[in-house]
Amino acid sequence: MKHTLVTLFSVMLLTLTSRSLAQEPLPVYLDDSQPVEARIEDALSRMTLKEKIAIIHAQSKFSAPGCPRLGIPELWLSDGPHGVRMEFVWDDWNHADWTNDSCTAYPALTCLAATFNPDLAFRYGNAIGQEARYRKKDIILGPGVNIYRTPLSGRNFEYMGEDPYLSSRMVVPYVKGMQQNGVAACLKHFALNNQEKNRDNINVEVSDRALREIYLPAFKAGVQEGGVWAIMGSYNKFRGQYCSHNEILINQILKKEWGFDGVMLTDWGSAHDTDEAARNGLDLEMGSWTNGLTWGVSSAYDNYYLAQPFLKKIESGELPESLLDEKVRRVLRLCFRTNMNRNRPYGCKLTPEHTEIARRVAEEGIVLLKNENHFFPIAPGRYQKIAVIGENAVKRLSEGGGSSELKPQKEISPLEGMIEKYGREHIVFTLGYASGAPNYSNELPSGLDVDSLVQEAVKVAREADVVLFFGGLNKNFQQDCEGDDRRNMDLPFGQNELIERIIKANPNTGIILISGNAVSMPWLSKVDGLIQSWYLGSQGGPATANVISGEVNPSGKLPFSIPVKLEDNSAHYFGEESYPGVNGTQYYKDDILVGYRWYDTRKIKPQFPFGYGLSYTTFRYGKARTDKKNYTANESVKLTFTLKNSGAKAGAETVQVYMSQKKPSVLRPVKELKAFKKVYLQPGEEQVVELEIPVQSFAFYDEGLGDWKLENDKYTLHVASSSRKIHSTATIEVNN
Ligand code: BGC
């Protein structure tokens, strides 16, 4: 009886509850069975004017408040782009010094680009997305896709090289890999942040054609093919207007033409005007006028251009509320894609798979530039005594450099990697040179004296069977570091002189340059072995030792040209008006001729060309063939050729296809990269390589037309192993 009564009571209660639930359905914005656009409109309609204003600007250094009353969570942002940055205190640039905010440091984006491997870019983006999600971040401030225009630019290491096609192919999988975790990628810096010098206010004047052909394609690919959810404006100006609220870049191109439906946010402190920010498509204002990057006052978020000043202008009728609503919609859309997506995975960090990805990218990105007399590989046992000389063999290079700094849980240095590979008894190390603290300082660590460092290096070199010099740049200010550019193209901290001394003491010397930028190499003819390495992150040591020892066959290719001297570079060729600018303005006089486009067209021989990189094996290219000879605009050329590993070691070759137009009506570069593929081959193995190249990609941007134009003409496709090494060509004709 008692049991029956209890059951009856429960049934009544259930009925009542479900009835009251039925009477009060979930609000549309919380109901994830509803279309996102309906949820956005519903949430928007419930928000007060003040709540709308609050959601479009920062509440702390790295967060925006969401809408607590409606249960819309805070948005948390983090740098980017090589791993998830450490935590910061609420309102300034001090590290929070947490003990649980370390990460896997992945190799810098120059290295990722040098892999020429889009599958790895996907895994890289996905891995950072997983770590970001685990760390409860909703937006990662990266990747950076500004074009490498000058070897002086302090941030080239955070970007993907000089070629718009290469960076486009690499950015799309990065974005997709990251966003499948419900974490937004944020392309930066939109646009034309091609130097750090005077970055806060330099005005860039560039032709429409160079903008479309060189500087925008990677952003466009990230938006249209990658479906990126956020974009960060750059600090500089374009045609007189700050890029973070630039009518042409944001309203006309990004939003109208490309159909971007995500959030356009500022760089930290890159907004300068409420009216422009309101009207020209800025959706979220971060980081300005705190006591951090921009001089100002603390906790001043209410003073932001998109905060109280915007509210006042709406209340007074000076600006319409519809402008605000449009921004709120975009922020809400981002929330539904990230922190309000209940189905997003939970993420993870520091997994063995993350370590493996960091190592793979490093191994595939290292570029072998010179290898005479079989200098490399150095198999264990080949030499009794290996001298490792140079600060970059031990310096913690994931630190410094500005906002891309990381706190890796583990960073294995090249020296540690070498000791692990060859045994402690076979390695002697000495510093050789020293650079001082990582950030914004050029002082030598106390107690070190340049002369004795050199003397010691010479002695160690003399007594060794082989010398490996680990030098290059580092993340100190005015090196590879945000906020300013390098002063010249030379190796810093007396390295050139040191290298000469070492070579004299022991001619059996190889150089490993670690940098994100080209350096001049006056000693090049005197060394047999040269490797271009990068900021490799957590697994730099093992990756480097694996390549040096031959356990891994190098397959990286240069994502930028290395000129003999700075004046050979297109940006510098035209003097100060072109770089760094005069009276606050610079003219990109090199126009579309950036990187190899310039060296090829002007017949200037670079030290090492774009796309160049050696292997421990050799490859034989067969004759290039196309499926037919005549094409119309909407077809693709099917290009085939054989590739054979003609050496004795398994290896990978990145085959590249460049296009030249026979008789263009405008100046065109001698060649432009239109396709590439990384092919892995066992010794003796031969494969038929097949590439599909859309004919439409042969078009140039016609300024008169304001659109892309494909001319009826003959086009030659060059099958190449670098921008300067062509193995076979095929010519086709386009007839529309
Ligand atoms: C950098 C951005 C970065 C931001 C936040 C700025 O100084 O230019 O790339 O994402 O700081 O740290």
Image: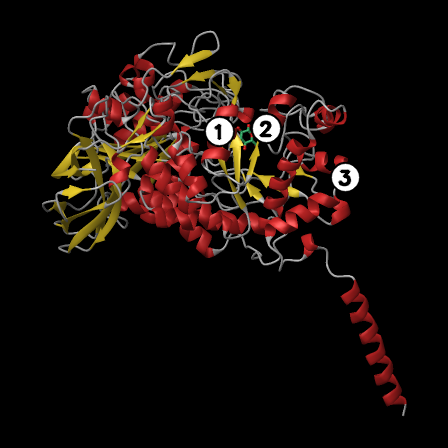
Position of 425 with respect to 241 (left or right) is left
Position of 33 with respect to 318 (left or right) is left
Which three-letter amino acid code belongs to the residue tagged 3? Thr
Give yes or no for contact between labels 2 and 3 (Cβ–Cβ under 8 Å): no
**Where residue 232 is drawn, which disc sits there?**
none
Residue 323, horizontal then vertical, whole percent: 64, 31
Nearer the observer, 72 or 467: 72
Distance between mark 1 and mark 2 Cα atoms: 23 Å
Instruction: Point out the tag, 2 or 3, that comes first from the N-terminus.
Output: 3
Q: Quadrant of the image for the N terminus?
A: bottom right
SS at mark 3? loop
Q: Quadrant of residue 566?
A: top left
Which three-letter amino acid code belongs to the residue tagged 1? Gln
Give yes or no for contact between labels 1 and 2 (Cβ–Cβ under 8 Å): no
Mark 1 — residue? 252
Instruction: Point out the tag, 1 or 2, that comes first from the N-terminus.
Output: 1
Evaluate whether residue 416 shows in this view.
no
Residue 61, horizontal then vertical, whole percent: 65, 33
**Where residue 48 is drawn, which disc sits there?**
3
- How dense is the environment of label 2, judged by Cα within 10 Å: few (below 14), some, or many (20 and up)? many
Nearer the observer, 647 or 717: 717
Callout 2: CB less than 8 Å from ligand 1: yes
**Where residue 268 is drawn, which disc sits there?**
2
Q: Quadrant of the image for the C terminus?
A: top left
SS at mark 1? helix
Q: Which residue shows up at 74% across the image and 45% down it?
A: 46
Residue 34, horizontal then vertical, whole percent: 62, 57
Distance between mark 2 and mark 3 Cα atoms: 27 Å
Q: Residue furthest left?
A: 623
516 shown above or below 223? above
Position of 220 with respect to 497 (left or right) is right
